[in-house]
């Protein structure tokens, strides 16, 4: 079984528990800034999960589409946010037209992509976003481990693939793939590990 499939199956297994515990809006400041820099309302959410961010986009009047690899998560999302559009899809091979969206949103999703595959995923996000469009990406800061399957003792035991980055390393990746980095910030989660999220706002040239 490949890495993507294994991580998707984990999310299928934990969908209801994950959804119940992850519905308080997390990216408040980031969403407010994103809203201030995007022109247009058509947004693609790459890795929408159980629809937490979908609810915020829809409430703010966006024409929202969410894609995810997990059917279980998509089912939760469509029940919670009936006004959103949701589709099962691989981030690196979407079915959308070139420049179809005014912006993309990728909160805590690209961190599940092996590093060797991340350029392909970034290129696809860029392809489906119009010139002058904007994007938001958040990944976890590197703290010891570089990348690999990580087993966690929650939701009855789960295994997911994670890639971790330093702030400059991911910024360099974005610039190498043709994005302008508009703003970088960090967001520390109030969890046991005090997880540090690296946040990037980008523009498509």
Image (cartoon, grey):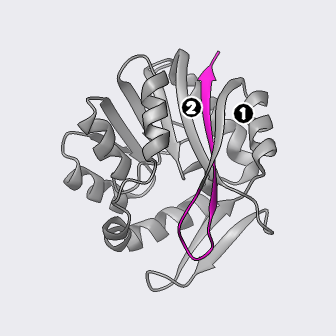
Q: Please provide percent x and percent y for residue 201.
A: 59, 33
Task: Pick the residue in front: 86 or 61.
Answer: 61
178 sits left or right of 68 in the view: right
Would you say residue 198 sits in the magenta stretch? yes
- The quarter of the rendered structure image containing the N terminus is bottom right
Q: Please provide percent x and percent y for residue 153.
A: 54, 85
* Callout 2–callout 1 Cβ contact below 8 Å: no
- The quarter of the rendered structure image containing the C terminus is top right
Based on the displayed image, in which of its 4 quarters is residue 161 positioned?
bottom right
In three-dimensional space, the C-alpha distance between marks 2 and 1, rounded to whole angstroms, equals 11 Å
At x 29%, y 53%, the residue is 77
Secondary element at tag 1: helix
Whether residue 92 appears in this view of the structure is no
Secondary element at tag 2: helix
> What stretch of residues is rendered in magenta?
188-205
Q: Please provide percent x and percent y for residue 170.
A: 75, 43
Q: Is residue 114 above or below residue 172?
A: below
At x 58%, y 77%, the residue is 192
Q: Nearer the viewer, mark 2 or mark 1?
A: 1
At x 55%, y 67%, the residue is 6
Whether residue 47 appears in this view of the structure is yes
Quickly name the residue at label 1. Answer: 174
Q: Is residue 180 above or below residue 75?
A: above
Picture mark count:
2
54 sits left or right of 69 in the view: left
Q: Please provide percent x and percent y for residue 60.
A: 28, 33
Quickly name the residue at label 2. Answer: 125
Would you say residue 202 sits in the magenta stretch? yes
């Amino acid at each position: 079984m490949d890495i993507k499939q294994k991580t998707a199956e984990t999310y299928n297994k934990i969908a209801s528990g994950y959804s119940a515990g992850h519905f308080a809006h997390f990216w408040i400041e980031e969403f407010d800034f994103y809203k201030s820099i995007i022109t247009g309302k058509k947004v693609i959410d790459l890795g929408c999960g159980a629809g937490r961010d979908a609810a915020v986009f829809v409430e703010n009047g966006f024409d929202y589409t969410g894609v995810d690899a997990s059917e279980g998560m998509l089912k939760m999302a469509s029940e919670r946010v009936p006004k959103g559009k949701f589709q099962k899809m691989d981030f690196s091979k979407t079915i959308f037209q070139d420049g179809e969206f005014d912006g993309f949103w990728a909160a805590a999703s690209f961190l599940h992509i092996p590093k060797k595959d991340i350029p392909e995923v970034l290129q696809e996000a860029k392809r489906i976003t119009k010139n002058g469009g904007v994007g938001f990406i958040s990944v976890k800061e590197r703290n010891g481990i570089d990348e690999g399957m990580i087993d966690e003792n929650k939701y009855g035991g789960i295994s997911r693939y994670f890639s971790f980055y330093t702030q400059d390393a991911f910024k360099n990746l974005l610039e190498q793939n043709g994005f302008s980095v508009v703003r970088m910030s960090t967001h520390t989660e109030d969890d046991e590990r005090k997880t540090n999220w690296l946040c990037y706002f980008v523009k498509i040239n």
